Amino acid sequence: MKYFFEVLPSIASGLQMTLGVFFITIIGSIPLGILVSLAMRSPYFSVRWLVNGYIWLMRGTPLLLQLIFIYYGLSMVGISFSRFDAAAFAFIINYAAYLAEIFRGGLQAIPQGQFDAAQVLGLNKVQTFFKIILPQVIKIVVPSFGNEVVNLVKDTSLIYVIGLGDILRAGSIAASRDVSLVPYLIVGLMYLAMVAVVTIVLRRSEKRLSAWR
C-alpha cells in the first residue's frame, strides 16, 4: 500500500489529459453526429453517398490506425497536427460516425405524423427539428449513446500511441521503471471509477427523460 500511494500522484497527473480528450470528443462529436445523421436523409444521392462512405471508413478501420494516420501519416504530406489536436480530431470524426448511426435510428423512430403535425402548426423545418423532433430523439437514443460514452472512456487509452501523457502512459512508465504491475492496477481502478461516474450520470439522465412519456 505504501508503494501504491507513492506512484498514485504520478499516474493521476495523466488524468487531466485523459479527461481533456474525453470531454472534447463529447463536445465535438455530438453536433457533428447530428449533422451527419441529417445528411444521411438528404434527397441528394451524392450527399448520401459521401456521408455513407465516411461512416463506412470510420467504422471499418480501427481508431488506433486512424490516430496513427492522422498524426504521422498526414505530416508526410505537409498537414501537421500537435499531438493533442491529432487525438481530438481522430476521436471526434470517429465517434461522430458511430453517433450518426445512433441518431439516424432515433430519427427513423419518430412517426411521420410528428412532422405533419408541425407543418400544420406552421413551424418551419428548423423549428420542427429543434422543438419537436430532437427532444424525442434524445430520449430514444440515450441508452445507445451511453454505451458509446462508456466505450469512449476506455478508448482514451489509445492516445498513448502518439506520445500523449495520459494515465495509461504514466502507468506504463512507472511499471517499466519499478518492474511492478501495481501501476497498471491503479490505472485500471481509475478507468473503473470514471466508467462508474459516467454510468451513474447516464442512468439519472435516463430517469429524468422518462418523465416525457
Image (spheres, rainbow, N blue to C red):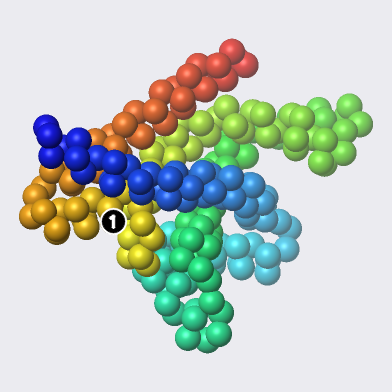
Q: Amino acid at mark 1?
A: Arg
Please tell me which residue is depicted at 35% across the width and 52% down the height of the picture: 166
Which quadrant of the figure contains the N terminus?
Answer: top left
Q: Nearer the viewer, residue 15 or 161?
A: 15
**Crowding at mark 1 (Cα within 10 Å: few <14, some 14-19, many 20+):** many
Which quadrant of the figure contains the C terminus?
Answer: top right
Please tell me which residue is depicted at 44% across the width and 34% down the height of the picture: 146
Q: Is residue 182 left or right of residue 143?
A: left
Please tell me which residue is depicted at 39% across the width and 28% down the height of the picture: 197
Please tell me which residue is depicted at 58% across the width and 45% down the height of the picture: 27
Residue furthest out toward the bottom: 77
Name the quadrant containing residue 193.
Answer: top left
Q: Is residue 167 left or right of residue 81?
A: left
Q: Position of residue 126 (x, y in %)?
A: 81, 41
Q: Nearer the viewer, residue 213 or 74?
A: 74
Q: Position of residue 96 (x, y in %)?
A: 54, 52
Per the image, the residue denoted by label 1 is 169
Residue furthest out toward the right: 122
Residue 93 vs 18, above or below: the answer is below
